[in-house]
Image: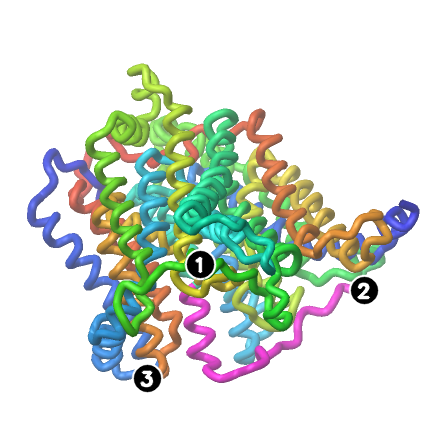
Amino acid sequence: MTELLELLAAAPFWISVLRVATPLILGTLGVLLCERAGVLNLGIEGIMVAGAFAGWLAVHGGASLWGGVAVAALTGALIGALHGVLTVSLALSQHVAGLGITLLATSLASYAYRVSFPRVDTPPTIEPFAPMSWLPVPVLNAQTPLTGLALLAVPLVGWVLYRTPLGLALRTVGENPAAAEGQGLSVAGLRIGAVVAGSALMGVAGAFLTLAAFNAFFFNMVNGRGWVCVALVVFASWRPGQALLGALLFGFFDALQLRLQQAGPGVLGIELPYQFYLMLPYAMAIVALVVMARRASTPQALMKPYRKGER
Amino acid sequence: MRLERRTTPSRAALLLAPVAAIAGTLLVASLLVAWAGAPVARAYALLLEGGFGSRFAITETLTRATPLILTGLAAAVAFRARLFNIGGEGQLYLGALAAVAVGGMHGGAGFALPAWLLFPAMMAAAALAGALLLLGPALLKSRYGVDEVVTTLLLNFIVLLFVGAMLDGPMKDPSAMGWPQSVALQEPLQLGRLVERSRVHTGLLGALALAVLLWALLAFTTLGFEIRAVGANARAAAFAGMPVTAVTVKVALLSGALAGLAGAVEVAGRAGYVTLDMSPGYGYSGIVIAMLAALHPLAVVAAAVFVAGILVGADSMSRTVGVPTYIADVIVATALIAVLVATLFTQYRVRRAVAK
């Protein structure tokens, strides 16, 4: 038990918590933006794959690292625009359209990767973001600037949502589109805008994996992180601050399972196959979803398409 | 520009919709094939030939279609009741694992029952495993309003890890030289060949029979009527006195069981043991197939054969002209979106916004 406590008190543990949490912070904020405007975006898993790939490809092709981040955001925004047209303009089932987007984006990224690199055994690498070692803050100075960006995005999204007319308009569209329409707001425009912006964040979340966490693109690297973000938004009751908390909590469990795996049976006193440790974060996401779903303040118009003159 | 619901579906649109969807899909795929530097027309010819153009191609396609029919039916029945079961992949693997647990040799320690008794037990175990896996998310949905899409998706990852642990541990085949694969099924439990010198197995007949049964269930029984009513409008169904939660639970058991059976049939009909790559996403493809088939059980069979043909054809085309096999996944995903859009335009027409 003391061993476990020592492990938790050490700085490297918290460094990895924050690193694991970064893509989740960005992705969860992305989902939050979409859902606050009333659109479920199950495309996130595929958008993260596409962002991870496009950002990495740009850097591999000679762009700067920030250039790669911009390409990832743009890729996310483009795919988001498609999702927006499908779910808002055409009012298709948000569940099915989102899954279609995920399948399409994932397969396109895999296809583009194989066309660009037909015969490689080891994935080509790039020089990833360096930690912000100039920062005088302990755990934070071991993180890359993308983690800094993610942490800054939390208050920014919160400010936009709660302190600006745009944020009020977005939330109105997600709660009561007919009322928003009555106020002279463009429901479709605001919803598509929110999906595009949210998807850009998801693209950056994916780029974190290839440009900061690792230095190459692998086919299964997103590995359900997108779905976890969808669960985290419910856990966060659609609030940016709580989204940060949820992502950190998830990062905590993911980092913990990794340490427990490495530490072996000595720490817990029982020997478990490593797969059971890997299950922990997914199981926690489900538990979080169940616990919070009962008192969550779901945006009232979430998943309800809005067609003028139709009820 | 806005959409206006048609009072009756336009006949021209009904005919044109599938054609437009296929044309759109082919256009996207053509651009990608051209980008890979391959001759487009030849690539398509090779894809068709590889999927449907020979005895070998057809038998391979039918072999691949067998689990896809079952996962497609699983998705179709669930989606009919608006239960978005995205966990077909996990249910398939758990079903496969349950089948081997009951029907496996386990180094001579397996059940020593006659095959006519053990075979149904094996299939029942697989169906039960899949059904129980979906029961949790279905109950959470109807009791607490927890979105079943996210729970079933997350369960897929948990189940795959669980199967991995089982293949490393209690169900490991010790003679597989460290390769993670399960113990084999007992010989008499494995499905026979349907066509000589091919891999098509009798599981195909089972899948077809289940498609007909499901169609009959949806079309002619009270439960089928309730499923359709709950799917059309759960609140109205509840108001009309239908037990919505009970219907959702029954649908979940049915859907999970079908996906679980897909796993058992795949194990018993092909390798005879479970591996971690036995399904290249059959569970997810099942969702696409169900949508392509407009959730109709009999159309699921056709859609499954179509998707299987593309998967098999892309493999062989890829070997010849060097277009990555992922083109098959792109085609299937694009087809899904194209069909969704095309179907919409059979029900809606585009109207220019009128100036106020």
Q: Quadrant of the N terminus of chain A?
A: top right
* Residue at the outermost right position: A2
Label 3 in the same subunit as label 1: yes
Q: Which mark is residue B321?
A: 3
Q: Front-most of A192 and B282?
A: B282
Taking the spot 21% from the left edge, 49% from the top edge, the residue there is B299
Say above or below: A183 vs A204: above
* Quarter-of-image position of residue A293: top right
Q: Earlier in the sequence, mark 3 or mark 1?
A: 1
Give the number of the mark in front: 2 or 3.
Answer: 3
Residue A111 among magenta residues: yes
In percent of width and height, residue A113 lies at 47, 74
Q: Chain of mark 3?
A: B
Q: Secondary structure at mark 1?
A: helix
Range shown magenta: A107-134
Q: Chain of mark 2?
A: A
Give the number of the mark in front: 3 or 1.
Answer: 1
Q: Front-most of B283 and B151?
A: B283
Residue of label 1: B267
Amino acid type for the residue under numbered disc 1: Val
Query: CB atoms at circles 2 and 3 under 8 Å apart?
Result: no
Q: Secondary structure at mark 2?
A: loop
Q: Which mark is residue A134?
A: 2
